[in-house]
């Protein structure tokens, strides 16, 4: 089958591009090697909406950061995604380091970041009572914020699908071959599920974007997996800070931050360690110890004992530390969306628009008249009045059955998450959409029940239910009971 556009990768950038492309009268496919959306970099990051002072002025990274930040309110309203503009602080511990804040302030102003200012010790202490005694100054960016990356990615995908885009999962693109046909220039994509064809290819393959790019272009690029480890703390620790708080940035990133999350937890991290393995998301004692040591230098009394899990994510660091977005010069019709590391999540709304305008321009596509930008999120009964909740249960009794006690997630929410398009097909897919399994017990109690619901709704045996697709089965066999 010939598609107008095939997008390789269903992370937040690929799904944002799919949603924006679904505004046009085009046949669109998103091909993803994993079993769901949001399985790579997009699932394990800081969940921060950056203000835009950190990126070098004049770069695409700086431009799209600020544009994406400005777009985030409307995008999250349309897609029903949690977003809170709580502001961010970059702190320093000495008068000598204030010059770094001054440089960031000037960069931010050049990039168009509004309302930036430097605050002194007294005001900073009022804003953040738990800063350490050594912390003296901070750059305050009121436009900084926090968002749910899982919900944002899934919402982009759902809205794209509602407007006609198709998704293929467990479909690894192994080779992209430009060719000619009666219809003109086309691309043949050899995948783990057979051959696909497209008039335009969007390369949003994350950590593998260099491999895909280098198959079609003589101008080679190189991406390094940069691992960042995090500690996530229980909601009892969520109010320890009020803003996103960063140390002074380093050559490898913005440093180990401390931030509340939109769901009320406290998140600390990441580290920045370059590795060779694009699947290397293991955590190490050394990296997690570095998270604790670094964050304690500027925030006092962090309740580390409230840590409920640790995890690591990989950033797709391109050698030039710049987003590579646009049609490749020596391969017409091939559009890169590569090197998307921080601030990629913040930039996603603007990245989606830029990619879509590029691909639609190549195809001379026209916009639809019936595009619907609105996506309704999964109903959370906790947001209802008692009367409305009782009425809901009377109509849909599954909303009265609590499956995940830590996060108070009901069976009705899990069923909704599975039945959506694209919907959850694994424990992690349910977790990212509903938070079932993200609480203090980390799925210790609710997993068997979630598995039963998945098995029933998908019509497959329990033995086929996985944690995260592939070979990650929970049940590997059944013993026969002899009585």
Image (tube, helix red, strand yellow):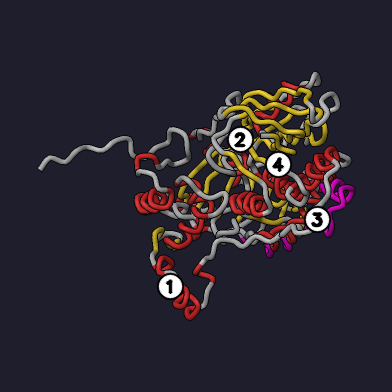
Helix, strand or loop at disc 1? helix
CB under 8 Å between discs 2 and 3: no
Residue 23, x across and y down, in percent: 76, 52
In the figure, 274 relative to 56: above or below? Answer: above
CB under 8 Å between discs 4 and 2: no
Q: Nearer the viewer, residue 401 or 480?
A: 480
| Residue occupying image coordinates x 50% and y 52% | 233
Q: Provide the residue designation for mark 3.
A: 118
Q: Of the two numbered discs 4 and 2 on the same chain, state the one appearing first in sequence.
A: 2
**Residues rendered magenta in the picture:** 104-129
Q: Provide the residue designation for mark 4.
A: 342
**Numbered disc in front, either 1 or 4:** 1
Question: Where, by quadrant of the figure, is residue 255 drawn?
Answer: top right
| Residue occupying image coordinates x 73% and y 28% | 187
Q: Nearer the viewer, residue 5 or 481?
A: 5
Among all residues in the image, which is located at the extreme left?
483
**Quarter of the image where the N terminus is located:** top right
Residue 410, x across and y down, in percent: 43, 62
Q: Provide the residue designation for mark 2.
A: 314
Q: Provide the residue designation for mark 1.
A: 393
Whether the magenta-drawn stretch holds residue 114 is answered as yes
Q: Of the two numbered discs 1 and 3 on the same chain, state the one appearing first in sequence.
A: 3
Residue 6 visible in rendering:
yes
Dot 2: few (<14), some (14–19), or many (≥20) neighbours within 10 Å?
Answer: many
């Amino acid at each position: 089958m010939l598609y107008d556009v095939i997008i390789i990768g269903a992370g937040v950038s690929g799904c944002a591009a799919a949603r924006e492309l679904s505004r046009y009268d085009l046949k669109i496919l998103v091909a993803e090697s994993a079993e769901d959306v949001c399985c790579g970099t997009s699932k394990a990051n800081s969940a921060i909406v950056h203000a835009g002072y950190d990126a070098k002025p004049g770069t695409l990274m700086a431009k799209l950061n600020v544009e994406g930040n400005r777009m985030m309110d409307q995008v999250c309203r349309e897609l029903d995604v949690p977003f809170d503009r709580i502001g961010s602080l970059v702190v320093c511990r000495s008068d000598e380091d204030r010059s770094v804040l001054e440089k960031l302030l000037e960069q931010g102003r050049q990039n168009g970041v509004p309302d930036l200012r430097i605050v002194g010790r007294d005001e900073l202490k009022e804003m953040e009572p738990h800063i350490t005694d050594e912390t003296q100054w901070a750059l305050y960016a009121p436009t900084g914020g926090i968002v749910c990356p899982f919900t944002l990615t899934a919402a982009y995908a759902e809205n794209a699908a509602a407007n006609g885009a198709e998704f293929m999962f467990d479909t690894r693109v192994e080779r992209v071959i430009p060719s000619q046909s009666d219809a003109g220039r086309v691309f043949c994509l050899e995948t783990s599920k057979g051959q696909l064809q497209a008039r335009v290819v969007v390369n949003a393959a994350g950590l593998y974007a260099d491999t895909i790019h280098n198959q079609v272009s003589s101008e080679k690029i190189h991406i390094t997996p940069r691992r960042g480890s995090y500690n996530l703390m229980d909601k009892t620790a969520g109010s320890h800070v009020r803003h996103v708080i960063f140390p002074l940035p380093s050559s490898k990133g913005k440093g180990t931050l401390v931030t509340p999350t939109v769901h009320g937890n406290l998140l600390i991290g990441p580290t920045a360690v370059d590795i060779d393995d694009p699947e290397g998301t293991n955590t190490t004692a050394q990296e997690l110890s570095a998270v604790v040591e670094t964050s304690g230098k500027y925030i006092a009394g962090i309740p580390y004992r409230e840590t409920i899990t640790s995890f690591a994510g990989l950033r797709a660091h391109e050698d030039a530390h710049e987003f590579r977005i646009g049609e490749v010069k020596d391969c017409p019709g091939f559009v890169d969306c590569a090197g998307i590391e921080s601030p990629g999540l913040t930039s996603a709304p603007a990245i989606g628009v830029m990619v879509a305008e590029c691909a639609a321009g190549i195809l001379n596509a026209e916009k639809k008249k019936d595009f619907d930008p609105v996506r309704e999120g999964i109903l959370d009964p906790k947001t209802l009045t008692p009367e409305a909740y009782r009425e809901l249960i009377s109509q849909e009794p599954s909303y009265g059955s609590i499956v995940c006690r830590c996060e108070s997630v009901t069976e009705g929410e899990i069923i909704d998450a599975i039945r959506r398009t694209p919907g959850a097909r694994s424990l992690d897919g349910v977790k990212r959409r509903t938070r079932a399994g993200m609480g203090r017990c980390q799925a210790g109690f609710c997993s068997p029940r979630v598995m039963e619901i998945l098995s029933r709704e998908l019509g497959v045996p329990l033995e086929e239910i996985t944690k995260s697709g592939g070979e990650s089965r929970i049940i590997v066999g059944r013993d026969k009971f002899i009585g």
